[in-house]
Protein backbone atom coordinates (compact mmCIF):
# COMPACT_ATOMS: atom_id res chain seq x y z
CA UNK A 1 0.00 0.00 0.00
CA UNK A 2 1.34 3.44 -0.94
CA UNK A 3 2.88 5.61 1.77
CA UNK A 4 2.00 9.28 1.76
CA UNK A 5 3.93 12.26 3.09
CA UNK A 6 2.58 15.77 3.46
CA UNK A 7 3.93 18.18 0.87
CA UNK A 8 4.56 21.86 1.59
CA UNK A 9 1.39 23.12 -0.11
CA UNK A 10 -0.65 20.53 1.82
CA UNK A 11 0.89 21.72 5.10
CA UNK A 12 -0.05 25.29 4.13
CA UNK A 13 -3.62 24.19 3.41
CA UNK A 14 -3.87 22.26 6.69
CA UNK A 15 -2.89 25.37 8.65
CA UNK A 16 -5.74 27.31 7.05
CA UNK A 17 -8.22 24.45 7.61
CA UNK A 18 -7.33 24.34 11.32
CA UNK A 19 -8.03 28.08 11.60
CA UNK A 20 -11.41 27.59 9.90
CA UNK A 21 -12.16 24.66 12.22
CA UNK A 22 -11.64 26.83 15.31
CA UNK A 23 -14.13 29.39 14.01
CA UNK A 24 -16.61 26.65 13.06
CA UNK A 25 -16.68 25.20 16.57
CA UNK A 26 -17.77 28.48 18.19
CA UNK A 27 -20.33 29.74 15.65
CA UNK A 28 -23.98 28.87 15.15
CA UNK A 29 -24.08 30.21 11.58
CA UNK A 30 -24.06 27.21 9.23
CA UNK A 31 -22.00 28.75 6.40
CA UNK A 32 -19.26 29.58 8.94
CA UNK A 33 -19.08 25.88 9.80
CA UNK A 34 -17.89 25.20 6.25
CA UNK A 35 -14.53 25.73 4.55
CA UNK A 36 -13.63 25.70 0.85
CA UNK A 37 -10.21 24.61 -0.44
CA UNK A 38 -9.29 25.15 -4.10
CA UNK A 39 -6.39 23.06 -5.34
CA UNK A 40 -5.39 22.14 -8.90
CA UNK A 41 -5.82 18.57 -10.11
CA UNK A 42 -2.77 16.44 -9.33
CA UNK A 43 -1.83 18.19 -6.07
CA UNK A 44 -3.41 15.65 -3.71
CA UNK A 45 -6.77 16.94 -2.47
CA UNK A 46 -7.79 13.46 -1.28
CA UNK A 47 -4.49 13.00 0.55
CA UNK A 48 -4.96 16.40 2.18
CA UNK A 49 -8.47 15.49 3.36
CA UNK A 50 -7.26 12.15 4.76
CA UNK A 51 -4.51 13.80 6.81
CA UNK A 52 -7.02 16.33 8.09
CA UNK A 53 -9.61 13.65 8.94
CA UNK A 54 -6.94 11.83 10.94
CA UNK A 55 -6.29 15.01 12.94
CA UNK A 56 -10.02 15.62 13.39
CA UNK A 57 -10.65 12.20 14.90
CA UNK A 58 -7.86 12.69 17.45
CA UNK A 59 -9.29 16.05 18.52
CA UNK A 60 -13.05 15.44 18.29
CA UNK A 61 -13.86 11.81 17.53
CA UNK A 62 -17.21 11.00 15.92
CA UNK A 63 -17.90 9.71 12.42
CA UNK A 64 -16.79 11.09 9.04
CA UNK A 65 -18.92 11.27 5.88
CA UNK A 66 -17.08 11.55 2.56
CA UNK A 67 -19.37 12.68 -0.28
CA UNK A 68 -18.79 12.60 -4.03
CA UNK A 69 -20.79 11.85 -7.18
CA UNK A 70 -18.68 9.06 -8.71
CA UNK A 71 -18.22 5.57 -7.26
CA UNK A 72 -14.68 5.18 -8.58
CA UNK A 73 -13.64 8.40 -6.79
CA UNK A 74 -15.11 7.01 -3.56
CA UNK A 75 -13.16 3.77 -4.01
CA UNK A 76 -9.90 5.65 -4.63
CA UNK A 77 -10.56 7.85 -1.59
CA UNK A 78 -11.20 4.84 0.66
CA UNK A 79 -7.84 3.31 -0.33
CA UNK A 80 -6.06 6.61 0.39
CA UNK A 81 -7.78 7.09 3.77
CA UNK A 82 -7.04 3.51 4.82
CA UNK A 83 -3.37 3.97 3.90
CA UNK A 84 -2.99 7.24 5.85
CA UNK A 85 -5.26 6.58 8.85
CA UNK A 86 -4.75 2.84 9.19
CA UNK A 87 -6.78 -0.32 9.63
CA UNK A 88 -7.76 0.35 13.24
CA UNK A 89 -10.59 2.56 11.96
CA UNK A 90 -13.58 1.07 10.13
CA UNK A 91 -14.51 1.94 6.54
CA UNK A 92 -17.63 1.43 4.43
CA UNK A 93 -19.47 2.47 1.26
CA UNK A 94 -22.94 3.82 0.65
CA UNK A 95 -23.78 3.95 -3.04
CA UNK A 96 -25.84 2.19 -5.70
CA UNK A 97 -23.61 -0.90 -5.84
CA UNK A 98 -22.73 -1.31 -2.16
CA UNK A 99 -24.28 -0.26 1.14
CA UNK A 100 -22.34 -1.13 4.29
CA UNK A 101 -24.90 -2.35 6.82
CA UNK A 102 -22.84 -1.99 10.01
CA UNK A 103 -21.74 1.27 11.63
CA UNK A 104 -18.34 2.51 10.42
CA UNK A 105 -16.08 5.45 11.29
CA UNK A 106 -15.62 6.51 7.66
CA UNK A 107 -18.57 6.28 5.29
CA UNK A 108 -17.86 6.95 1.60
CA UNK A 109 -21.15 7.85 -0.04
CA UNK A 110 -22.41 9.01 -3.42
CA UNK A 111 -24.59 12.10 -3.36
CA UNK A 112 -27.29 10.34 -5.37
CA UNK A 113 -27.74 7.48 -2.88
CA UNK A 114 -27.46 9.69 0.18
CA UNK A 115 -30.08 12.07 -1.17
CA UNK A 116 -32.58 9.20 -1.42
CA UNK A 117 -31.69 7.75 2.00
CA UNK A 118 -30.61 10.75 4.08
CA UNK A 119 -33.64 10.55 6.38
CA UNK A 120 -32.32 7.21 7.62
CA UNK A 121 -29.49 9.12 9.32
CA UNK A 122 -29.64 11.60 12.17
CA UNK A 123 -28.85 15.16 11.14
CA UNK A 124 -25.89 15.20 13.53
CA UNK A 125 -24.82 11.64 12.65
CA UNK A 126 -21.43 12.81 11.39
CA UNK A 127 -19.09 15.21 13.18
CA UNK A 128 -17.14 15.93 9.96
CA UNK A 129 -18.38 15.99 6.36
CA UNK A 130 -15.91 16.08 3.45
CA UNK A 131 -17.23 17.09 0.01
CA UNK A 132 -15.06 16.17 -2.97
CA UNK A 133 -15.54 17.88 -6.36
CA UNK A 134 -17.60 20.46 -4.47
CA UNK A 135 -18.20 22.69 -7.52
CA UNK A 136 -21.30 20.53 -8.14
CA UNK A 137 -22.87 21.54 -4.83
CA UNK A 138 -25.61 23.73 -6.33
CA UNK A 139 -27.07 20.75 -8.21
CA UNK A 140 -30.43 19.29 -7.17
CA UNK A 141 -28.79 15.98 -6.29
CA UNK A 142 -26.31 17.61 -3.93
CA UNK A 143 -27.85 20.56 -2.13
CA UNK A 144 -30.60 18.67 -0.22
CA UNK A 145 -27.96 16.41 1.35
CA UNK A 146 -25.68 19.31 2.29
CA UNK A 147 -28.59 21.17 3.88
CA UNK A 148 -29.87 18.09 5.74
CA UNK A 149 -26.74 17.19 7.71
CA UNK A 150 -25.54 19.38 10.59
CA UNK A 151 -21.92 18.38 11.25
CA UNK A 152 -19.55 20.33 13.47
CA UNK A 153 -17.49 21.11 10.38
CA UNK A 154 -17.66 20.65 6.58
CA UNK A 155 -14.55 20.63 4.37
CA UNK A 156 -15.23 21.18 0.65
CA UNK A 157 -12.59 20.65 -2.03
CA UNK A 158 -12.42 21.38 -5.75
CA UNK A 159 -9.92 22.10 -8.50
CA UNK A 160 -12.42 24.17 -10.47
CA UNK A 161 -14.70 26.41 -8.39
CA UNK A 162 -16.16 28.40 -11.29
CA UNK A 163 -19.17 26.66 -12.81
CA UNK A 164 -20.35 27.02 -16.40
CA UNK A 165 -23.85 28.02 -15.21
CA UNK A 166 -22.34 30.85 -13.11
CA UNK A 167 -23.77 29.42 -9.86
CA UNK A 168 -21.20 30.34 -7.22
CA UNK A 169 -20.34 27.61 -4.70
CA UNK A 170 -19.06 30.35 -2.40
CA UNK A 171 -22.72 30.99 -1.59
CA UNK A 172 -22.68 27.58 0.11
CA UNK A 173 -19.17 27.38 1.58
CA UNK A 174 -18.05 30.99 1.86
CA UNK A 175 -14.89 32.44 0.33
CA UNK A 176 -12.09 29.94 -0.18
CA UNK A 177 -9.67 29.68 2.75
CA UNK A 178 -6.87 28.31 0.56
CA UNK A 179 -6.27 28.50 -3.19
CA UNK A 180 -3.54 26.88 -5.26
CA UNK A 181 -4.50 27.20 -8.97
CA UNK A 182 -3.04 25.26 -11.85
CA UNK A 183 -0.84 28.10 -13.19
CA UNK A 184 0.85 28.50 -9.78
CA UNK A 185 1.32 24.73 -9.41
CA UNK A 186 2.95 24.50 -12.85
CA UNK A 187 5.24 27.45 -12.11
CA UNK A 188 6.39 25.84 -8.85
CA UNK A 189 7.15 22.54 -10.56
CA UNK A 190 4.52 20.58 -8.63
CA UNK A 191 2.84 19.22 -11.76
CA UNK A 192 4.19 17.41 -14.80
CA UNK A 193 5.82 19.51 -17.49
CA UNK A 194 3.41 20.12 -20.38
CA UNK A 195 4.33 19.60 -24.02
CA UNK A 196 1.25 21.06 -25.72
CA UNK A 197 0.78 20.94 -29.48
CA UNK A 198 -2.10 22.68 -31.22
CA UNK A 199 -2.80 20.73 -34.42
CA UNK A 200 -3.44 23.33 -37.13
CA UNK A 201 -2.57 21.27 -40.21
CA UNK A 202 -4.47 21.98 -43.42
CA UNK A 203 -6.22 25.20 -42.47
CA UNK A 204 -8.00 26.62 -45.50
CA UNK A 205 -8.76 30.06 -46.99
CA UNK A 206 -5.73 31.63 -45.27
CA UNK A 207 -6.02 34.70 -47.51
CA UNK A 208 -9.13 35.49 -45.47
CA UNK A 209 -6.76 36.59 -42.67
CA UNK A 210 -5.85 39.58 -44.86
CA UNK A 211 -9.46 40.86 -44.83
CA UNK A 212 -9.66 44.42 -43.37
CA UNK A 213 -10.26 44.09 -39.63
CA UNK A 214 -13.43 46.20 -39.67
CA UNK A 215 -15.08 43.57 -41.86
CA UNK A 216 -13.94 40.55 -39.81
CA UNK A 217 -15.57 38.76 -36.89
CA UNK A 218 -14.54 35.80 -34.73
CA UNK A 219 -17.53 33.86 -36.04
CA UNK A 220 -16.46 34.46 -39.65
CA UNK A 221 -12.88 33.38 -38.91
CA UNK A 222 -14.04 30.10 -37.35
CA UNK A 223 -16.32 29.37 -40.29
CA UNK A 224 -13.85 30.15 -43.09
CA UNK A 225 -10.49 28.93 -41.79
CA UNK A 226 -10.87 25.91 -39.52
CA UNK A 227 -11.71 22.60 -41.17
CA UNK A 228 -12.84 19.42 -39.39
CA UNK A 229 -10.58 16.47 -40.10
CA UNK A 230 -11.82 13.03 -41.13
CA UNK A 231 -11.79 10.32 -38.47
CA UNK A 232 -9.16 8.15 -40.13
CA UNK A 233 -6.98 11.20 -40.69
CA UNK A 234 -7.18 12.05 -36.97
CA UNK A 235 -6.37 8.44 -36.04
CA UNK A 236 -3.33 8.46 -38.37
CA UNK A 237 -2.02 11.70 -36.83
CA UNK A 238 -2.51 10.28 -33.31
CA UNK A 239 -0.68 7.04 -34.17
CA UNK A 240 2.16 8.97 -35.82
CA UNK A 241 2.62 11.33 -32.85
CA UNK A 242 2.36 8.52 -30.27
CA UNK A 243 4.98 6.41 -32.06
CA UNK A 244 7.60 8.87 -30.77
CA UNK A 245 6.47 8.57 -27.12
CA UNK A 246 7.77 5.66 -25.06
CA UNK A 247 5.22 3.79 -22.90
CA UNK A 248 2.36 6.02 -24.06
CA UNK A 249 -0.67 5.89 -21.74
CA UNK A 250 -3.33 7.94 -23.47
CA UNK A 251 -6.71 9.48 -22.63
CA UNK A 252 -8.69 10.81 -25.61
CA UNK A 253 -11.63 13.16 -24.92
CA UNK A 254 -14.26 12.71 -27.64
CA UNK A 255 -17.33 14.78 -28.62
CA UNK A 256 -19.86 11.92 -28.34
CA UNK A 257 -20.44 8.29 -27.37
CA UNK A 258 -20.74 7.35 -31.04
CA UNK A 259 -17.40 9.00 -31.78
CA UNK A 260 -15.74 7.10 -28.89
CA UNK A 261 -16.86 3.77 -30.31
CA UNK A 262 -16.15 4.73 -33.92
CA UNK A 263 -12.63 6.12 -33.45
CA UNK A 264 -11.54 3.19 -31.25
CA UNK A 265 -11.81 0.96 -34.35
CA UNK A 266 -8.89 2.88 -35.88
CA UNK A 267 -6.69 2.77 -32.76
CA UNK A 268 -5.19 -0.59 -31.71
CA UNK A 269 -5.18 -1.57 -28.02
CA UNK A 270 -7.77 1.09 -27.16
CA UNK A 271 -11.02 0.92 -25.17
CA UNK A 272 -13.98 3.33 -25.10
CA UNK A 273 -15.49 4.18 -21.69
CA UNK A 274 -18.78 6.07 -21.52
CA UNK A 275 -22.09 6.44 -19.71
CA UNK A 276 -23.96 4.04 -22.04
CA UNK A 277 -22.04 1.14 -20.47
CA UNK A 278 -22.87 -0.51 -17.16
CA UNK A 279 -20.87 0.68 -14.15
CA UNK A 280 -19.31 -2.77 -13.95
CA UNK A 281 -18.11 -2.64 -17.56
CA UNK A 282 -16.71 0.87 -17.04
CA UNK A 283 -14.82 -0.32 -13.94
CA UNK A 284 -13.39 -3.34 -15.80
CA UNK A 285 -12.15 -1.15 -18.65
CA UNK A 286 -10.66 1.42 -16.29
CA UNK A 287 -8.79 -1.40 -14.49
CA UNK A 288 -7.49 -2.62 -17.86
CA UNK A 289 -6.13 0.89 -18.52
CA UNK A 290 -4.62 1.13 -15.03
CA UNK A 291 -2.80 -2.20 -15.28
CA UNK A 292 -1.59 -1.53 -18.83
CA UNK A 293 -3.67 -4.15 -20.64
CA UNK A 294 -5.08 -1.27 -22.69
CA UNK A 295 -2.85 1.74 -23.33
CA UNK A 296 -5.52 4.09 -24.72
CA UNK A 297 -8.90 5.12 -23.34
CA UNK A 298 -11.50 7.08 -25.33
CA UNK A 299 -14.17 8.87 -23.32
CA UNK A 300 -16.59 11.80 -23.37
CA UNK A 301 -16.93 13.31 -19.88
CA UNK A 302 -16.36 10.30 -17.61
CA UNK A 303 -12.76 11.28 -16.82
CA UNK A 304 -13.34 14.98 -16.16
CA UNK A 305 -12.99 14.46 -12.42
CA UNK A 306 -11.36 12.26 -9.86
CA UNK A 307 -9.93 9.47 -12.02
CA UNK A 308 -6.38 8.96 -10.83
CA UNK A 309 -4.08 7.21 -13.31
CA UNK A 310 -0.79 9.00 -12.60
CA UNK A 311 1.00 7.18 -15.43
CA UNK A 312 -1.16 8.98 -18.04
CA UNK A 313 1.36 10.83 -20.20
CA UNK A 314 -0.71 11.67 -23.29
CA UNK A 315 -3.94 13.71 -23.34
CA UNK A 316 -5.76 14.27 -26.63
CA UNK A 317 -8.60 16.75 -27.13
CA UNK A 318 -11.18 16.04 -29.82
CA UNK A 319 -14.05 17.54 -27.84
CA UNK A 320 -14.84 21.24 -28.17
CA UNK A 321 -15.90 23.00 -24.98
CA UNK A 322 -16.58 26.64 -24.24
CA UNK A 323 -15.91 25.91 -20.57
CA UNK A 324 -12.40 26.54 -19.20
CA UNK A 325 -13.55 24.51 -16.16
CA UNK A 326 -14.05 21.33 -18.21
CA UNK A 327 -10.87 21.97 -20.19
CA UNK A 328 -8.70 22.21 -17.06
CA UNK A 329 -10.41 19.18 -15.50
CA UNK A 330 -9.53 17.13 -18.56
CA UNK A 331 -5.98 18.48 -18.84
CA UNK A 332 -5.55 17.63 -15.15
CA UNK A 333 -5.84 13.90 -15.92
CA UNK A 334 -2.26 13.98 -17.19
CA UNK A 335 -0.65 16.47 -14.80
CA UNK A 336 0.19 14.27 -11.81
CA UNK A 337 3.95 13.80 -11.37
CA UNK A 338 5.33 10.27 -10.95
CA UNK A 339 8.80 8.75 -11.22
CA UNK A 340 9.80 8.06 -14.80
CA UNK A 341 7.28 10.49 -16.30
CA UNK A 342 9.15 13.33 -18.00
CA UNK A 343 6.11 15.28 -19.13
CA UNK A 344 2.55 15.06 -20.39
CA UNK A 345 2.13 15.32 -24.16
CA UNK A 346 -1.04 17.09 -25.28
CA UNK A 347 -2.49 17.02 -28.79
CA UNK A 348 -5.30 19.51 -29.33
CA UNK A 349 -7.42 19.03 -32.45
CA UNK A 350 -10.12 21.43 -31.20
CA UNK A 351 -8.87 24.38 -33.17
CA UNK A 352 -10.96 27.53 -33.26
CA UNK A 353 -10.35 31.17 -32.39
CA UNK A 354 -11.67 30.87 -28.84
CA UNK A 355 -9.46 27.84 -28.08
CA UNK A 356 -6.29 29.46 -29.42
CA UNK A 357 -7.08 32.64 -27.50
CA UNK A 358 -7.77 30.74 -24.25
CA UNK A 359 -4.54 28.72 -24.51
CA UNK A 360 -2.49 31.83 -25.19
CA UNK A 361 -4.03 33.59 -22.18
CA UNK A 362 -3.49 30.56 -19.93
CA UNK A 363 0.16 30.15 -20.91
CA UNK A 364 0.78 33.86 -20.37
CA UNK A 365 -0.52 33.39 -16.80
CA UNK A 366 1.84 30.42 -16.32
CA UNK A 367 4.81 32.45 -17.56
CA UNK A 368 3.88 35.33 -15.24
CA UNK A 369 3.77 32.92 -12.30
CA UNK A 370 7.17 31.52 -13.30
CA UNK A 371 8.63 35.05 -13.22
CA UNK A 372 7.05 35.63 -9.80
CA UNK A 373 8.57 32.40 -8.45
CA UNK A 374 11.99 33.28 -9.87
CA UNK A 375 11.77 36.82 -8.47
CA UNK A 376 10.78 35.68 -4.98
CA UNK A 377 13.32 32.85 -5.04
CA UNK A 378 10.78 30.55 -3.42
CA UNK A 379 12.53 27.47 -4.80
CA UNK A 380 15.78 26.25 -3.22
CA UNK A 381 19.00 26.51 -5.21
CA UNK A 382 19.46 28.10 -8.66
CA UNK A 383 16.05 28.74 -10.16
CA UNK A 384 15.61 27.38 -13.68
CA UNK A 385 11.97 26.51 -14.20
CA UNK A 386 10.89 24.45 -17.20
CA UNK A 387 7.10 24.17 -17.35
CA UNK A 388 7.09 22.99 -20.97
CA UNK A 389 5.49 24.87 -23.82
CA UNK A 390 2.45 25.40 -25.98
CA UNK A 391 3.49 25.15 -29.61
CA UNK A 392 1.54 27.34 -31.99
CA UNK A 393 2.26 27.06 -35.70
CA UNK A 394 3.02 30.28 -37.58
CA UNK A 395 -0.55 30.15 -38.94
CA UNK A 396 -1.98 29.94 -35.40
CA UNK A 397 0.17 32.94 -34.46
CA UNK A 398 -1.28 34.83 -37.43
CA UNK A 399 -4.78 33.94 -36.24
CA UNK A 400 -3.94 35.21 -32.73
CA UNK A 401 -2.73 38.47 -34.23
CA UNK A 402 -5.97 38.90 -36.20
CA UNK A 403 -8.06 38.05 -33.12
CA UNK A 404 -6.24 40.75 -31.16
CA UNK A 405 -6.99 43.26 -33.90
CA UNK A 406 -10.65 42.23 -34.01
CA UNK A 407 -10.99 42.50 -30.23
CA UNK A 408 -9.27 45.87 -30.05
CA UNK A 409 -9.61 47.36 -33.51
CA UNK A 410 -13.34 47.64 -34.12
CA UNK A 411 -14.63 50.72 -35.92
CA UNK A 412 -17.68 52.52 -34.52
CA UNK A 413 -19.65 51.61 -37.64
CA UNK A 414 -18.99 47.87 -37.20
CA UNK A 415 -19.81 48.02 -33.49
CA UNK A 416 -23.09 49.88 -34.06
CA UNK A 417 -24.10 47.30 -36.66
CA UNK A 418 -23.33 44.50 -34.19
CA UNK A 419 -25.61 46.09 -31.58
CA UNK A 420 -28.39 46.57 -34.12
CA UNK A 421 -28.12 42.94 -35.27
CA UNK A 422 -28.22 41.68 -31.68
CA UNK A 423 -31.20 43.91 -30.86
CA UNK A 424 -33.02 42.54 -33.90
CA UNK A 425 -32.35 38.99 -32.78
CA UNK A 426 -33.50 39.69 -29.18
CA UNK A 427 -36.36 41.97 -30.29
CA UNK A 428 -35.31 44.52 -27.69
CA UNK A 429 -32.33 46.58 -26.54
CA UNK A 430 -29.53 44.21 -25.41
CA UNK A 431 -28.14 44.27 -21.86
CA UNK A 432 -24.39 44.11 -21.15
CA UNK A 433 -24.56 40.47 -20.00
CA UNK A 434 -26.26 39.52 -23.29
CA UNK A 435 -23.58 41.33 -25.26
CA UNK A 436 -20.83 39.50 -23.33
CA UNK A 437 -22.59 36.17 -23.91
CA UNK A 438 -22.80 36.91 -27.65
CA UNK A 439 -19.14 37.96 -27.62
CA UNK A 440 -18.08 34.51 -26.40
CA UNK A 441 -19.77 33.06 -29.49
CA UNK A 442 -17.86 35.47 -31.72
CA UNK A 443 -20.98 37.42 -32.68
CA UNK A 444 -19.85 40.83 -31.42
CA UNK A 445 -17.37 42.71 -29.24
CA UNK A 446 -17.52 42.68 -25.44
CA UNK A 447 -19.50 45.26 -23.47
CA UNK A 448 -16.16 46.59 -22.22
CA UNK A 449 -15.03 47.21 -25.82
CA UNK A 450 -18.23 49.17 -26.53
CA UNK A 451 -17.66 51.23 -23.36
CA UNK A 452 -14.01 51.93 -24.23
CA UNK A 453 -14.76 53.11 -27.76
CA UNK A 454 -18.00 55.06 -27.15
CA UNK A 455 -17.31 56.31 -23.61
CA UNK A 456 -19.94 54.05 -22.02
CA UNK A 457 -22.12 51.14 -23.07
CA UNK A 458 -25.24 53.30 -23.04
CA UNK A 459 -23.59 55.88 -25.30
CA UNK A 460 -22.99 53.04 -27.76
CA UNK A 461 -26.69 52.17 -27.62
CA UNK A 462 -27.64 55.80 -28.30
CA UNK A 463 -25.30 56.10 -31.30
CA UNK A 464 -26.75 52.83 -32.63
CA UNK A 465 -30.20 54.50 -32.27
CA UNK A 466 -31.40 51.84 -29.85
CA UNK A 467 -32.25 53.96 -26.80
CA UNK A 468 -30.92 53.49 -23.29
CA UNK A 469 -31.33 50.69 -20.77
CA UNK A 470 -32.61 52.48 -17.66
CA UNK A 471 -32.75 50.64 -14.35
CA UNK A 472 -35.24 51.82 -11.76
CA UNK A 473 -33.85 54.60 -9.60
CA UNK A 474 -31.30 55.88 -12.11
CA UNK A 475 -31.64 58.89 -14.42
CA UNK A 476 -30.29 59.12 -17.96
CA UNK A 477 -27.80 61.68 -16.71
CA UNK A 478 -26.44 59.24 -14.12
CA UNK A 479 -26.21 56.40 -16.63
CA UNK A 480 -24.52 58.44 -19.37
CA UNK A 481 -21.48 60.28 -18.01
Image (tube, helix red, strand yellow):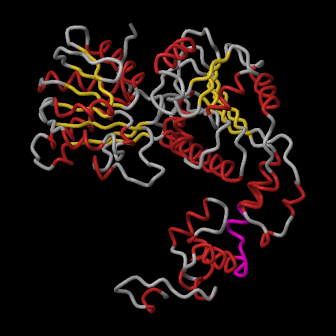
Q: Nearer the viewer, residue 111 or 176?
A: 111
Identified at 39% across, 53% down, the residue is 167
Q: Is residue 343 visible?
A: no
Q: Is residue 69 visible?
A: yes
Residue 129, percent from left and from top: 23, 32
Q: Nearer the viewer, residue 165 or 179?
A: 165
Taking 467 as reference, is 49 left or right?
A: left
User: Does the segment drawn in magenta span residue 410?
Assistant: yes
Residue 481, percent from left and from top: 49, 88
Magenta: main secondary structure? helix
Residue 237, percent from left and from top: 80, 28
Instruction: Look at the image and give the residue range highlighted in magenta.
Output: 404-414
Identified at 77% across, 22% down, the residue is 239
Q: Nearer the viewer, residue 256 or 242?
A: 256
Taking 129 as reference, is 350 left or right?
A: right
Taking 11 as reference, is 366 left or right?
A: right
User: Does the segment drawn in magenta span residue 256?
Assistant: no
Identified at 55% across, 46% down, the residue is 324
Amino acid sequence: MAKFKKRNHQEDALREIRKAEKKALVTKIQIEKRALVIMASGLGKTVLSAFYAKEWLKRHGGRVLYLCDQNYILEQAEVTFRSIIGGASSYGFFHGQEKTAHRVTFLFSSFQTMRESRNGFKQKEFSLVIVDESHHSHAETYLPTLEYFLPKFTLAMTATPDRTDLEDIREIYGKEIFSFPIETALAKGLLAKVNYQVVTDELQNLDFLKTPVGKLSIKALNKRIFVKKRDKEIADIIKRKMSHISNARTIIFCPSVYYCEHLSKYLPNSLPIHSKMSSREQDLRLKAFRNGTANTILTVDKFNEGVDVPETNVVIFLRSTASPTIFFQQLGRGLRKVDGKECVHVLDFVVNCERIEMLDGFWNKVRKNVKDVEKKGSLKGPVNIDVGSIRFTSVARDVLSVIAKIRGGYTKEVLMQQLQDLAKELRRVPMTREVDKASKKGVCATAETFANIFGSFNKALIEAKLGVNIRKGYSKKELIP
